[in-house]
Each structure stands twice: as C-alpha cells, then as structure tokens.
Image: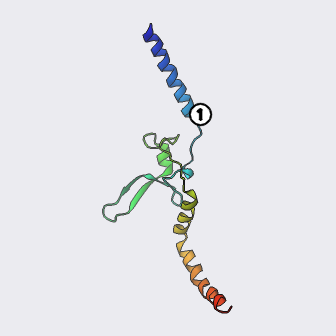
Amino acid sequence: MKFLHYLLFIINITKVEVYFIKNQYKSICDNCKFFIPNRNECRKFGEINIITGKYSYESAISVRNDEDKCGEYAFLFEKNKIKFATIPYYFLLENDKLIFILSYNLVPFILCYIFTK
C-alpha cells in the first residue's frame, strides 16, 4: 500500500515540475552574460581554431533550439549583472573605425578651442 502512495506522489511531483518549467518566463538571450550581441552568438558554446587561435561560437538561435545545450527554456541562463558595461563595449568593437575617424577629425578643433581661450 505504501508503494502505491509513493508512486502516486512521484507521478504528481513530476507533473508539477513540468508544469512550472513550461510556464516559467522564457529567459531572453539578450539578458544573458554569455550572449554576444553584435554577432548574436553564445559564448558558452564555442571552440578554438588551433591554427589561428580565434574562437568561433555557435549562434544563439541554434543553442536555444537544441535541448542538449541551453534549450527553449534557457536552462543555462545566467543574468548579465554588468550589462551597463557590455553594451558600450560591443558598440565600440563594432564601430571602432567610425569612432577613430570622428575623433581624428575632432582633435584639431578641440585643441584650437582649448588654446584660444
């Protein structure tokens, strides 16, 4: 008789767990610390090229679609606590040439303004 109670308890607990997992808020990759926003890649899943030494990461979409990796419900999600620093960092990486050209052209004007006062 106790076996039947244990069995029913286990069946109900697993149903409750599945219900809460499926109904929990789906985490967004943009808020994850492993997400690379300028390339839409996941830093958690990648490999290094042994010849060039550069990392190649998998796309965030393929990682989220694969249940063995992060999955639809983002089981490996970790909140990005320093998002205020990562957004400008990736902006600078993506627009480094533009920033260089603008700063190169603005330096003479700034120096003239400083020395004419």
Q: Residues within 10 Å of mark 1 (few under 14, many from 20)?
A: few
Instruction: Identify the residue at horizontal 64%, vertical 91% (top origin).
Output: 115
Q: Is residue 91 above or below residue 114?
A: above
Q: Give the residue type at disc 1.
A: Asn
Residue 109 in the image: state x and y as whole percent. 64, 87
**Percent coordinates x, y for residue 103 in the rendering:** 58, 80
Q: Which corner quadrant holds the C terminus?
A: bottom right
Image position, residue 26 (x, y; %): 57, 41
| 101 displayed left or right of 113 | left
Locate residue 113, reporting x and y percent: 66, 88
Residue sitting nearer the eye, 84 or 42: 84
- Residue at the outermost front position: 117
Give the residue at x 47% y 20%: 10
The quadrant in which residue 83 appears is: bottom right
Color style of the picture: rainbow
In terms of secondary structure, where does tag 1 sit? helix
Relative to 72, say whether 11 is above or below.
above
Against 65, is 116 above or below? below
Residue named by callout 1 = 23
Identified at 57% across, 75% down, the residue is 99
